[in-house]
Amino acid sequence: MSGNSSMFRPASYREASARTLRDTPEVRDSVGSATRTFDALRTKAYAEVDSDRWRDWAQDVKAHALTNLDEYLEQAEQSLVANGAHVHWASSADDVRRLLEAIVVEHKVRTVVKAKSMLSEELEVNAYLDTLGVRSVETDLGEYIIQLLGEPPSHIVGPAIHRSLEDCRALFHEQLGTPMDADPDELAAAARAALRGDFLAADLGISGGNFVAADTGTIALIENEGNIRLTTSVPRIHVALVGIEKIVPRFEDLAGFLQLTARAATGQPIGLFVSLIQGPRTADEIDGPEEVHVVFVDNGRTALYEDDTAWEALRCVRCGACLNICPVYRQTGGHAYGWTYSGPIGAIIAPGLLGLDRALPLPHASSLCGACVDVCPVRIPIPELLVHWRERTVEEGRNSAGERLAMRSYAELAERPNAFSKAGEALRWTPWRAVGKALPVLSGWMQEREAPSPSPKSFRDLWREGIE
């Protein structure tokens, strides 16, 4: 069972989103239902605590950790090595792949079990393992479903939320022989039974890392199914892929972040399973891996870090709350974004990690309603960063020729009061219902909206009457 390759086609966002709305309207129903449920649970969970105070604290801790990132990374390395773990540094996806190949060859790995990890999706780990002749199996139920389908995740927390129960019934009937009317518990049981043998046969387990405490070298992992616990303890070798931004200064910081992340993501006080991993098993322990490899991954994060404005996106804890509240994401789900990270957070980290040229037009895939910043557990100013990348697009001349012409024309017109007034009068009587649909700048907007009717009098006329 080979893994999924991330699409990495943000440039096709407009076409992909239109295609989703046109050809698969059921995606909007599934995604909308799931995200509204997630958001309602988050609202309830936030109300149970002083969420504003918690979020202020989380923002400050993450900002402090990022401001002193080099020091805390070095401290984390020293702590992990002292715990018996192997620490590696990967500046790119190629570095990660070379490391994995070395481990696969040295230990004659044939089967890999994987815990849910968005970073492994970003690095296209499954596809690479497949080229090495290694069978990689996703063990998170949502990831397992989309792996059977050959699709990438549609959501940071719920990778298969774009699929309905009927879709899953048909898939499991075909792949695992379950009845077509199986209930969700039966489907989960069938997946559990299929995966049990993979856990026992695997030579290598790969996970991500929600947080790493620098002072103790502790990797914290949150889950609800127990698959991460098995992935990181049953195979002989455990590889944890961790973005360099996942550092927190102290072990005691984990208590707050683990709870806040769970409340933001799924509305739970804390995940059902929390694994705290520091290194391989010791001589007096009966289970656990013989080797633990922690790979700190850059892969564009340093470039994002060096941006004086956009660096704040690195505070992200990957809770998915901004996706759940976003009215744009709810219409299409994540696949239209063409990249591992979708929704508002994807739109602000893609330009930093991929480069602005590859990320366009994702910073424009937003109405700037501001709902995302209201729910973010670490208070990332997402709308401000979206505007930042839009400004960079203009500064670098990456906006369309039509847009540049339109803005230049407007600026020149606005500097001539008489011409501006006459143009405004003409526009008031333009038949926009017909004209708008024919103009490239307005045609997309007019597909979903009706042009407003002009008022009997212009603002200038009303102003003039009011002061006479």
Image (tube, rainbow, N blue to C red):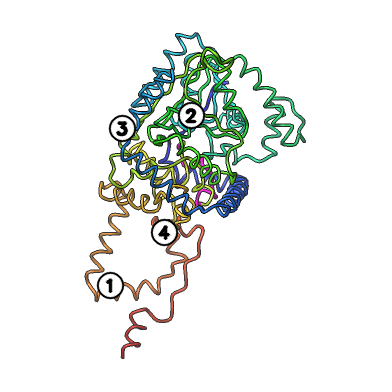
Q: Is residue 21 above or below residue 246?
A: below
Which residue lies at the image location 48% right of the left edge and 9% below the top edge?
107
For the residue marked with disc 2, what is the amino acid? Gly
Residue matched to label 1: 420
Per the image, the residue denoted by label 2 is 208
Viewer-nearest residue: 428 or 76 = 76
The residue that disc 4 covers is: 442
| Camera-nearest label, 3 or 4 | 3
Question: In this rendering, which labeled residue sits more in front, label 2 or label 4?
Answer: 2
Residue 58 coordinates in the image, percent (x, y) = 43, 46
Q: Is residue 361 above or below residue 448?
A: above
- The residues tagged by marks 2 and 3 sit, at their Cα atoms, a distance apart of 22 Å
Q: Secondary structure at mark 2?
A: loop
Residue drawn 57% across the image and 27% down it? 228
| Residue 170 in the image: above or below residue 200 | below
Query: Height in image: 149 above or below 419?
Result: above
To which residue does mark 3 refer?
A: 71
Give the Cα separation between the discs numbered 3 and 4: 50 Å
CA gap between label 1 and label 3 equals: 57 Å
Q: Look at the image and give the residue range highlighted in magenta.
A: 326-339
Q: Amino acid at mark 1?
A: Phe
Earlier sequence position, callout 1 versus callout 4: 1
- Answer few, some or many: residues within 10 Å of disc 1's Cα (few below 14, many 20 plus, some between 14 and 19): some
Q: Secondary structure at mark 3?
A: helix
Query: Residue 410: within the magenta?
Result: no
